[in-house]
Amino acid sequence: MNWIDIGHIDDIPLHGARVVKTPAGCVALFRTGAAEVFAADDRCPHKGGPLSEGIVHGQSVTCPLHNWVFDLNTGAAQGADEGRIGTYPLRVEAGRLLIDGAAVGKRSAA
Amino acid sequence: MTQKLVIIGAGMASGRVIEHLLDADPGAYDITLFNAEPRGNYNRIMLSPVLSGDKTYEEIVTHSDDWYAERGITCRFGEHVVKIDPDMKVVEGENGHVPYDKLVIATGSAPFIIPVPGHDLPGVISYRDLDDTNAMIEAAAKGGKAVVIGGGLLGMEAAAGLKERGMDVTVLHLTGHLMERQLDEAAGYLLRKDLEARGITVKTQASTKAILGEERAQAVLLESGETLGADLVVMAVGIRPETRLATDAHLDVARGIEVNAQMQTSDPDIYAVGECVEFDGHLFGLVAPLYDQARVLADSLLDQPNAFAVKELATKLKVTGCDLFSAGDFAEGEGREDIVFRDPARGIYKRLVIEDGRLVGAVMYGDTADGSWFFGLIKDGADIEEMRGTLIFGPAFQGGASADPLSAFAALPPEAEICGCNGVCKGQITRAIETGATDLGAIRATTKASASCGTCTGLVDQLLAVTLGDGYAAPQALPVCGCTSHTHEDVRRLIKSQELKSQAAVWQELGWTTANGCHVCRPALNYYLLADWPLEYKDDPQSRFVNERKHANIQKDGTFSVVPRMWGGITTPDELRAIADAADKFAVPTVKVTGGQRIDLLGVRGEDLPGIWSDLNRAGLVSGHAYSKGLRTVKTCVGTDHCRFGTQDSTGLGIKLEKHLWGSWTPHKLKLAVSGCPRNCAEATCKDIGVVCVDSGYEIHVGGAAGMEIKGTELLCKVATEEEAIEVISAMTQIYRENARYLDRIYKWLDRVGLDWVKAQIVDDAENRRALAERFQLSQSVYRKDPWAEHAQDSATRAQYAPLANLTLEAAE
């Protein structure tokens, strides 16, 4: 684990998202509740849609291109669609967002 | 010859075994009955009323000492069984051995105690038998605080009983809603609300870390760090089969004592019955299957063939005043559909789960009268397709063997209540229909039926169909999405009538089933709220599709297209230069002329949007809203300025209209055009609203489309002046904004309400037309502005377009 401070939780709108750039493409950060955040791939496995632009509801996000819905806990596509996005450890400490650089690094190496 | 039968445990299951045996053949066995409790069989289900003080122990005894004595049963009550010796066929009690020919183990279950620190302190009790109940009654007599750990069935009963006895009660439950095994979230919510109304505190997602206290329990510490004072702690987290004797005797034991369908254990002379057994992977906690087992076991002991089978189970409970019922499998799943009935005013919730045309599950709260009927349908696997429309209203609404749900309605007596909110019965509604109220709106206006909570709308529809026959076209009544059972129309009406001014208010008051909606309902609610409460409601960007949140159209590669407004399709060399410069500066790959008479810059990166907007704003260009469910463009021809056929200044009117309407949000996109003569070069007759100029004035057409469907417009009216045209078009836009379903173009909405209705509202009724136009103007005082300038100039909003962080360096290291 290598926790990297990437910003403040209030930089992400409630029920909204932001992205973090990495060498292997963007990681999307989703804020689903006052103090509830998730990190996952910003790329929909269907047609590459930017998930950070989707509508965030419950603990899910809907891809803006073709309405695939992903559970942010598991990264699994919901309903009839089949696919999965990578999810990454993200935690909040005193309002600061900390992402696991090791997991993000592994992702770029893979 | 009389054989010796020993039974260990005098509970409800073994009690029933004894009754069956004595009924069938009183002389077959010489019975000895052990019971660890110092008493015989009583009705454990009735311990709750004993706890709450509604009944006494004496009232719930099923087998008294006399009863056993009269039947010659040797009772060894209050005596623990030490062990069973299957080889010698002897049961060893604390006070001596008893040999057996046949043995029945009916040891029931033991409460599960979570092994947190302090669980063994005095003042921590479980809730299982009369002794526990008496201990609670004794503790409650001193008053003070009680914490009940476990929000399942037993926990609910303990909490309700202790509250009844005057304690200050808090229920802790590990998961998100109470009784999650028997109830779904909505019913769990109602139960919680009922308990809270009674003064019981409920904490869900509360995990117990420790029970604190020196001499005895004084407080409960939660994982969250919260501490709750407690004079009494009741552990009601669950039960497990009591299998110790069977394990020691080397019988096959899994979670419970394993038995075959004859209730026989792995030792052919030893049987087991009740909560201590496991059959075919199932454990048993409700009384119905235990009684089935008792019947089978009695037959087995008498060498009668019989076999136990697991049946579908229903739970019908009454937690001191809260009626709840659940049966079958009510989890959501693929291929499953729900029928939901809610009456928020009366706290009633019913949900039926249907799979392959059959009822597979039911959850009911508040009104459980039809529970057993639904349970029968589940058990029988009955085909319910034919009565699907009225199924949720129960057997009273089914016409016997009738295949037609409508005939069930026809058969209802005139005094049958249809609308519970307003107390309207069938007779009143049929009279209203017969005197000319031939649609839902008219019935609401004349009788008030379905005019409050709206849940009886389906019934009123059916009555219209029954009474009017083929003359009635039933409306489609699909819910907005899976989060609610309400239709778009219901939601719009309720937002207005209940003055709901936030999404949270809508979710709560209309009983949304999800925490904060989904991608289908959120944009619709956001629109309805801003259209109905332009001054009070604040637009929520997170409830908008990306295009409307970012004020640009997302493309398949995640880049955006940017379309500045060109009023009425007129531009200038300066504007064109600014567009060209912006395209160069931001390396825009494609520049295209659109069908709406403007220029599209395609392939702009999301983070460049505020920059390109700033540049375009400097040249006076504003957002063209080419991405919105709102006013798009007003297309024009050149009209009298240049054209030899032009009858009016179509370009000028187009520009005036666009400047009047721009920025407004509508249920779907809104495209206009103004043609200067009937040659119609601006193609006004396939627009949502089109103006065709003629010598004597302006024809206003509505309901055209040239998208997935090609629709020609219909003539709304003809007016003489530009001012009148603008007022009619404002009123038309507003009446559409106020009434249409989200994502209905004008033509689709007109299919539902009819052009005549619209004409009556805004052509015939001048006052209403003016009021509509004024309401439109009021809304425009908030929304007629350039979102590009707002986003580009506000540094906080502008920042949202950039990545939060760039880890391309860190991660590479």
Image (spheres, helix red, strand yellow):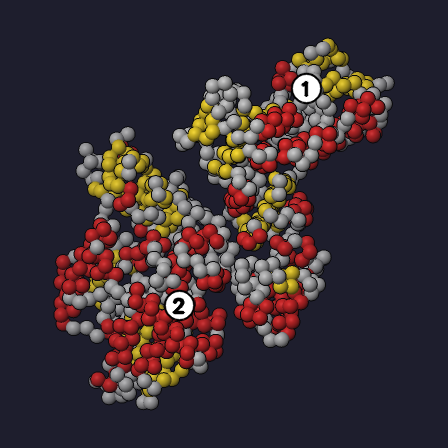
Write down the quadrant of residue B599 in the picture. Answer: bottom left
Secondary structure state at the residue bearing disc 2: helix
In the rendered structure, the answer to whether residue B20 lies left or right of residue B724 reads right
Q: Closer to us: mark 2 or mark 1?
A: 1
Say which residue label 1 marks.
Answer: B36
Q: Please identify the quadrant where the N terminus of chain A is shown.
A: top left
Residue B310 image position (x, y, % from top left): 66, 35
Would you say residue B580 is visible in this rendering? Answer: no
Is A21 placed above or below B749 here?
A: above
Compared to residue B347, the image places residue A3 above or below, namely above
Which amino acid type is shown beneath numbered disc 2?
Arg
Mark 1 chain:
B
Residue B235 placement: quadrant: top right
Q: Nearer the viewer, residue B435 or B315?
A: B435
Query: Which residue is at 43% across, 67% downward?
Result: B740
Residue beneath the point at 37% across and 66% down: B666
Residue at left offset 60%, top offset 43%: B322
Of helix, strand and loop, which one carries label 1? loop
On the image, which quarter does residue B806 sit in? top left
Compared with B663, B218 (above or below) is above
Look at mark 2 in the image and give the residue it sits on: B737
- Seen from the viewer's position, the closer of residues B405 and B48 is B48
Which residue type carries mark 1?
Ala
- Badge 2 and badge 1 in a common chain: yes
